[in-house]
Amino acid sequence: MGAVLVAALVAVAALAPVLSAKNPLASDVEHGLSELGAPLPPSGESVLGTDQLGRDVWARVVAGAGTSLAIATLATLIALVLGLSIGLIAGYAGGAIDNALMRLVDLVLAFPFLLLAILLAALFREANLASSNAPVFLTLGAVGWMTMARVIRGKTQVLAGSEMIMAARAIGASPSRIIVRHILPNVAGAVIVVTALGFAQNLLAESVLSYLGLGPPPPAPTWGRMLYEGRAYYRIAPHLVLVPGVAILLAVIGFNLLGEGLRDAADAKVQR
Amino acid sequence: MNRLGGVIAVLLAAGCAPADRGPRFRPAGATTPRDGGTLRFAVKDQVRTLDPMIADDDSGWYVLHPLFDTLIDFSPDLEIIPRLATSWAVSQDGRTYTFELRPGITFSDGVPIAAAHVKYSLERTLHAQDSPFTQYLGDIEGAHDVIDGRATTCAGLLTPSDHRLVIRLAQPNPALLDIFAMPFTTPQRAEHVAAAGDQLRRRPDATGPFMLDSWDEGDRVVLTRNPHYYDPTRAHLDAMVMIENVPRDTQFEMFERAEIDAAEKLATPDYLFVMSEPAWQPYVHRSPAMNVYGSRMNVQVKPFNDRRVRQALNYALDKRHTQRLLNGTTVPAHGILPPGMVGRDPGLAPYPHDVAKARALLAEAGYPDGFDVEYVTTNDEETEKVAGSLQSDLAEVGVRLRITVMSWAAWQTAIGQPQGPAFSFASWTADFPDPTDFFDPLFDSRAITSTNSSNNSFYQNPELDALLDEARRAPDLLERKALYRRAEHILYDDAPWIWDYHRLSTEVTQPYVRGYELHPIWQRDYTSAWLDLGPGGAPVAR
């Protein structure tokens, strides 16, 4: 189920130009707004209606899928690299290094997630990075690696004490070789599950940041921003809230289900 | 999936459920105005001062106007009407004004108002270092002696009796009567000003239909009826409460919960909501305001030094687009004077949207393929929307805009310099309803300066200068009207701006608020309003 939703989402993002001939950024005052300048409800002309600037909502939601997926992917990758390295090092090295790294995790976790994300997003924004999406995925990457680090560290710790690793050490394998060749393949299942769940979280967090005005700058269509811009129109044009809201809902559910499915698969493998 | 489907179904149902969206109340049905009740409204900023000599912010005026009567006032049709003065006369040469004060007028404590109180008030403004209104009195004889500290009393202000004020001008000023409708000209007492000291900003010496009850700064101003006021038709309400620091969308929410009786300048979604409901229509107020919006071009710089280019851009703009983007709260402009203003020629039609003509004019001027140009606008939702619309309209005739967005302050500085951006958003709001406050600062060649030039199209036309001089001196209203109409036609043809629109003010009131319309100058003037409530003073449900 999750895989179907995710596959559909990826397909929509990839086929965006094919799925909607309309430009998601072009506002069509002539045909996209009512006489009074109100957004138009869904119709044959535009399947999901138009927004407050006369832009096609379907075109925007489809284009937004690409933006959201790109940001969530990059953010998850950053979190993956950070969390995995810290978890592996802490778990394998143990002692003072483990202690220092785990206290760092505690420190970052001690900050409310949103507050930290808002602070970082504002700082990255100030830095005027080349890509307009960069502040968002850097922020999400920077606040999303702790779960991964903790899970991997625990698994690594157990493995480090195992006979297999003792044997490897005994024949003189270097720590880096042990981590890469022996521990990494054994934590891969957990990595995949945490990544899938983290992806869902990043997707949601990107919408939250966009809603707060800290996402990619306008007019780039993102679901969070669409929701934010449409919220004031909920009475006269409910589709402006429903469309991006349902899109976020489906995507997050999709990745969560996928994560759960993968976990079940991983568990089964362990049992086998 | 079933659960998911359920969630979506609930969401859809909640979003689309038909609900009664009309007003909750109706007028109780009184046929004559009723006295009593408290009218509550809110503003988005806070009042800085209640000293009429200093206050010049919009929300300040909403309470200043009920607190301070002036010799004369503007009717909703912008006619001059009597208030504290019953009559006034202007001499043939336009240099002597004689006001007869109404008998029996008093301050809110019952002390009679005399002509000397008006004289004191004006001299206080002339002495003041911090009054934004001093300049308006500059044409009075001897005013500059007081401003420069060479005299303590102004030679041109005479009070032959307690009920007569004579004002002699050094040169004619056709806007003088307009100036005497501004709150800073209200009579004041020297004793009160001295006694209040630095608390004067909190202790208004009221002369109007209302007086100050309390002011919890930053929270609310409460006015109560002035028992000594001479005109009972201007004081039906027992009290008025103005709540400060309420954002526009919150105002509308409070309005819907009936916590306030009026909400102004509605945010777009709220305005669209109200307009989509027929039952609200009788309670939606719209009024022209003293403004004009468009784009100004530096007419001394290529390609805008060619009149055909400027006309072409006027033809290329589709004013229906702006009107739609701004939800129909605009009137298309053919020039700078807003509807209702003296001297505006209602017969002059705005430039039509004519792409073929625009292309032909551009080709004639040597730009058959158009050109690329920078366009500067301000960082505001409305101006950015309008700039985007202009960009796509002009693209149709090959003129490609690169839009640069600036803060209001940066934009203002940039366009006031001859070497600044040649093409930009422009707007003007007049301080008082007289054509001089539109034409003279914007298009008189003598208003061109090297920085902060108010003539920011750097338009020079000796014919127009002469016409404006003549209009300024003309004592007769009809004559002035004709002269300003000629000025309008000259500017229409020369097109130093792309004339776009005049913005209307909007407000929605509860159905039981009666006797009220938005005022073109004071905007929210509730002095004559009354509340049509049911028995016990409660609103009647619809």
Image (cartoon, rainbow, N blue to C red):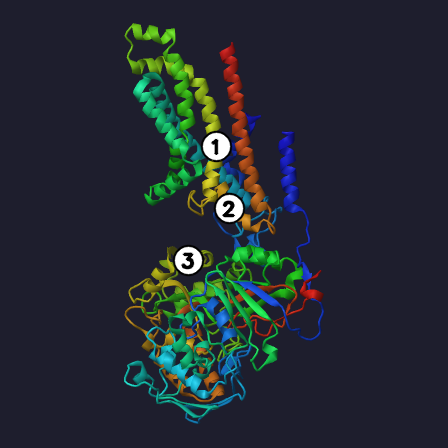
Q: Is residue B105 visible?
A: yes
Which label's residue is closer to the chain start, 2 or 1?
Answer: 1
Q: Is residue A23 placed above or below B107 in the rendered structure?
A: above
Dot 1 lies on which element? helix
Q: Residue at x 33, y 62 (%)?
A: B421
Q: Which residue is mark 1?
A: A201
Mark in front: 1 vs 3: 1
What amino acid is found at the position of numbered circle 3 in the picture? Gly
Q: Which image quadrant for residue A156? A: top left
What amino acid is found at the position of numbered circle 1 in the picture? Gln
Q: Residue at x 46, y 72 (%)?
A: B335
Residue B339 in percent (x, y) is at 52, 74
- Per the rendering, the mark at residue A228 is 2
Q: Is residue B333 visible?
A: no
Q: Is residue B33 placed above or below B312 in the rendered structure?
A: below
Dot 1: chain letter: A
Q: Which image quadrant for residue B96? A: bottom left
Q: Is residue B451 placed above or below A183 in the rendered structure?
A: below
Cβ atoms under marks 2 and 1 closer than 8 Å:
no
Mark in front: 2 vs 3: 2
| Quarter of the image that includes the C terminus of chain B | bottom right
Q: Is residue A182 left or right of residue B63?
A: left
Distance from disc 2 to disc 3, alpha carbons, whole Å, reads 35 Å
Q: Nearer the viewer, residue B341 or A11?
A: B341
Discs 1 and 3 lie in a common subunit: no
Dot 2 lies on which element? helix
Q: Which residue is mark 3?
A: B398
